[in-house]
Structures are given as C-alpha cells and as structure tokens.
Image: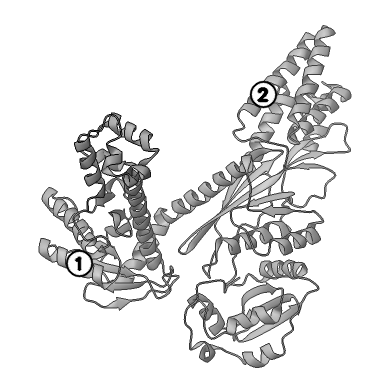
Amino acid sequence: MVDDQPPTSNPDAKKILGFDHKTFLKNLTSKPGVYQMYDKNGAILYVGKAKNLKKRVSSYFRGSGLTTKTVALVSRIHNIEITVAPSEAEALVLEHNLIKAQKPPFNILLRDDKSFPYIYLSDGEDHPRLSLHRGSKKKRGRYFGPFPNVSAVRESLNFLQKVFGVRQCEDSVYRNRTRPCLLYQIERCSGPCVNKISDHDYAADVEQTALFLEGKNDNLHQSLVTLMERASSDLHFEQAAIYRDRITALRQVQAQQVMEAGQRNMDIIACAIAPGASCVHRLYVRQGRVVGSKNYYPKNKLDNSEADILSAFVSHSYLGDSGMDVPPYVVLSHPIPDAQALAEAIELHSHRKIQMTANVRTYRAKWLVMAEQAAKLNLQARLNSAHTLEQRYEALQEALAADETPGRIECFDISHSSGESTVASCVVFDQNGPVKSDYRRFNITDITAGDDYAAMEQALNRRYSRLQKEGKQLPGLLLIDGGKGQLSKARHVMAELGIQEVELIGVAKGTTRKPGFETLIRADGSEMILASDSPALHLIQQVRDEAHRFAITGHKQRRDQKRRTSTLENIPGIGPKRRKELLQFFGGLQEVMRASADDLAKVPSISKKMAEEVYTSLHSE
C-alpha cells in the first residue's frame, strides 16, 4: 500500500502525470486484480493488488492527500497494466509472484530469498541417516524445521550425534566402510555400517531421535525411563547406563530452553521502523519452544507503515517457493488490514490453514514483547553502525556545504504537560553514534508556565556556560527542535556567551507535522528542505527523535514524582503521623481539601490554630 499516509496538499498532481489517467480510469473495472505501473521506458515501477481496481488505482490520481514519495511515483507513470483475478486472495498470490519476478523499485522488497535449512531424516533404508538439508524437499524421508540458520541446524545435529548416535555420514562413505570410523571410537555413532548395532536397536534410536525433533519430549522421556528400567531388570547395566545418560542429556537441554509452553508451531513477527529504515524480527517457535530468530531489513522506499511492511513480509515468506513451512499460527506486532485475504491466499497456495493475530496473551504475549524489543534494538544498532553513520554524516556535510563533517552534534528539546514539570533535554551524537554519557536533562524553573522560548533559553544558558567554564568540548552542530522562535533564543544565548564556532540549525515540523517534511532553518534565517529519503535528513531525524524521547522520559519522571508527593508534606508542623491521621479521619486527600477549618480541628492531634494554618496552606494561591 502506498497511499495510507498523512495528507499533503498536491495541487499540481494533474500536471505531472505522464498519461491520460481520466480515460484510463473511466474504463477501468471494479473487480479484484493486480495493477502494474511502468515508466516511459517500459521499466516496472510498482506492483499492487486491489479488492476494487477502479477505487484503488483512482486513489493515486486524486488532487490532494498524496505523500511526496507517492507523487514522485505517480509523476513517472507512463502506462498501467491490469490483470483481473477471481478473488482478492488470488490477486494477492499473483501480486507476490510478480513482485518476486520483476522486483519493482517502489515495492517493499526482501532480499533474503534463500531457502531455510532443515534437518533431514532419510527413509526406506536399513539404517536411516540424519543430515542438514536446504532446497526442495523431493527426497523420501522426514524434514524437521525450518531452522533460522545453518548454525542452529549444526548445533542440533551435534547434540543428536552425542545422545542418540544415529549416523550422519554420506551414503557413499557408509556403503564402503569395512571397519568402524573415528566417530564410533569416540562414541558419536553406533556403527551400523559394520553391524556394531542390531537393526532393531538402531530403529529404536531413530525413533527416539524423531520424537526429540518433533518436540515430544514427554513421550521420549517416558520411553527412555521404561527402557532403562527394563534393561536394569534384565541385568543389562551398560545399556541401562546409556538410557540414563540420554535422560540426563534430555533434561539438560530442556532446562536450557528459556521459553517453552504448549506444543504449538508458530512464528512471532515484529516490525520496527525509523526514518529511511525498517527491521522485521522473526521468532521461530516449534513444538512450544523458541528454537531461534532472524532479522530482516526490507527496503522501504515509500515510508510504509509497520502494517504494510508486515503484510509484504508475510506474503513473501509464506507465498514463496523458498521451502519455508507455513505454521498454523502467526503472531504479528501490528494488525494488518488484509489479514483475511492473505490467509486465504496462503491456504490457496500451500493448502494449509493459517491464523494471524496481533492480539495475544500469556506466553505468546511474552514472546511478542521479546520480538518487538529485538526488532527495535537491532534497528537501532543498524542505524548506529559505523557504515550507516559515516554515510549519513557525509550526506549532512554535503547538504550543509560544510568544509568538514560535524564531529559532534548536540540537540535540545523541551517537554511539559500544559506547562507542568518542564524539562529540557540535551543529547549528544558523534560519528560513532549516541554519546549517552554526555546526555543531560535540565529541570526548568522560574519561567511562565508553557513558555518554550524561555525554557530553551534557560537550558542553553546552563549548558554552554558550564561547558565554557569547565573548558569542555563544544559541538560542531547544534540542533534546536523548533522553529524560528527557538532558534532566535539559541542565537541570542550563543552571542551572549561569545560562542561563534557552533553552527545552529532549527528543525521545524512541516505543515503535516509528520516525519519527512521537516524544514531546516539556518542561523541567517534561510530555510532548507531535504528530500525525505536523504541520509542527511535521516541523521537529523534520528538525533531529534532521541532528544524528544529523552525529554519526554525526564518530564514524565518529574511529573509523576511531583504527583506522588502529598500536598500535606509542604505544610509546617504536619509530620508523617499527623498526615496519616488527617487522611484516615477524612478518608483521603480530596476530602481533606474540602474540609473547613472547623472540620480539620476535629482531628484529635490538630489544634484549632493548626487547623487554620492547614486550611490556609491548602487553599492559598
């Protein structure tokens, strides 16, 4: 989806179109289907699906309400081709196939198209083999997974080799053995190639391996206990010891499972977005156990929402031919509008039912929180990576036409609730990312409530007069979250302090007050608007958003602390004991506030004179 964005005025939309859209729309069907947008050279721009083609395609050509990036897409359209589908679900399948084949630049694209690894247990042989498998599942046997990566498969195979001893050697090696290999010597294989184990016992080991891979640990544990007791009763103590060791290993691996509940297979998928970047984190839950996770960083050319990215991700993952199994249950961090159609399309494609939800409780809610936190942290790490920051700093230097990149950036923001508990924040970035040890908060006092200009002036004065006094490093670039008024205060403070080497930039919100439409105001009053996909703007947004977060956190802490403090605590002569008696006598602070001086004097420990003082204090200006 590309038009579910904040509205902006677009009076020149009709002038930039490259073909006769009015005639095209007049003859367009209202049936479900897929539309493909092409430029003047015949190159694909965008592929989309629609429940109603006429309504959906018409939305691109309205006179207002389109984002800047959508206008850029529409301005390049030279031709649109339509494919009608029997249903919205089948349109979704077709959309997925076209996106995968054509890779349109304006669609959300996921580059990781490799098949997922599995553990393969062969079948139809006297001595089945365990191995890693990736690709189409054509061979006869059982496939367990998918696993998030090859390392997880190798770790599992290593455990299975130590515990159950099922062979993992290539068939060519197995058929040509005449004596046991080294794995048999170190007790990692039971040696079926040279008949060191009977077919019956080997089949039992294979079955136990399968039970473990299916997550049926309770069944496996009970089976091993029965076998151990039987072997012990038959005086086969060596065999009983083998079963005992397997039980111990099984308990250890169960203890290592941090998250385990139920017996379901499901995927937990969370999305986090930031200016110019996004991260999707997937947790793999198999048989009630979290077996791994994986991060994806889809390209988001149109600043799509989390719901749009998740919809494209689910479509890519479960409608593709990458070998990804479709779990019966998928938990999403954000509800997606086309969930029902997407579920129908997946069932049509894979012949498996799938349930998608963003509303979960108990252990699934805990898993979802894990995935959401991981998505946010991994996205932040990617944004703060040396390569990304270097690109953004270089782009900022170019945008500001500076001789060198600003080595240190500081940003100020103000936060309050209708003037209450005003807090200013200062965050610091250098070319390695946030310098959190240099972050500062300022509790603003002695100003008119709600006066952001005065709050900004006070915070800047306190910050830079102290830096000057202590001889500490000044920033190369100072960002002020606000417009010309706040920037004017910053210029005044810097002039008063004699600081001339710091470049000042005001970051004013655009008319829509949405990310991507900021206006940058320089110290000389000139304004600059960077493209919404500019790495320089993304760096400024990142620093500004961090200052905003830091200010809000400080304001909430100060406000909550103030509200937790009883009004009675500031009255002379009213200590903890009298405070408790007042509250108990009247049943709460509100009733104390309503009480007259005579009513207050009825409290045993409150004299008439003290009652008058309490009443005066509670009702004074």
The furthest residue to the top: 235
- Determine whether, in the image, residue 118 is placed left or right of residue 227: left
Nearer the observer, 8 or 559: 559
- Determine whether, in the image, residue 547 is placed left or right of residue 103: left
Name the secondary structure under disc 1: helix
The image quadrant that residue 189 belongs to is top right
| x, y percent for residue 272 | 52, 56
Question: What residue is drawn where x is 42% and y is 53%?
Answer: 385
Q: Which mark is residue 251?
A: 2
| x, y percent for residue 278 | 52, 59
| x, y percent for residue 325 | 74, 50
The N terminus lies in quadrant: bottom right
- Determine whether, in the image, residue 324 is placed left or right of residue 352: left
Q: Is residue 34 above or below residue 283?
A: below
Residue named by callout 1: 489
Question: What residue is drawn where x is 52% and y is 83%?
Answer: 64
Q: Residues within 10 Å of mark 1 (few under 14, many from 20)?
A: many
Residue at mark 1 to residue at mark 2: CA–CA distance = 66 Å
Name the secondary structure under disc 2: helix
- Determine whether, in the image, residue 564 is placed left or right of residue 93: left
Contact? badges 1 and 2 (CB < 8 Å) = no
* Any part of residue 493 in sight: yes
| x, y percent for residue 533 | 45, 70
Question: Which amino acid type is shown beneath numbered disc 2?
Answer: Arg
Q: Which mark is residue 190?
A: none
Question: What residue is drawn where x is 76% and y is 67%?
Answer: 89
Q: How many marks?
A: 2
Which circle's residue, 1 or 2, is located before the other in the chain?
2
* Any part of residue 189 in sight: no
Between disc 1 and disc 2, the foreground one is 1
Q: Residues within 10 Å of mark 2 (few under 14, many from 20)?
A: few
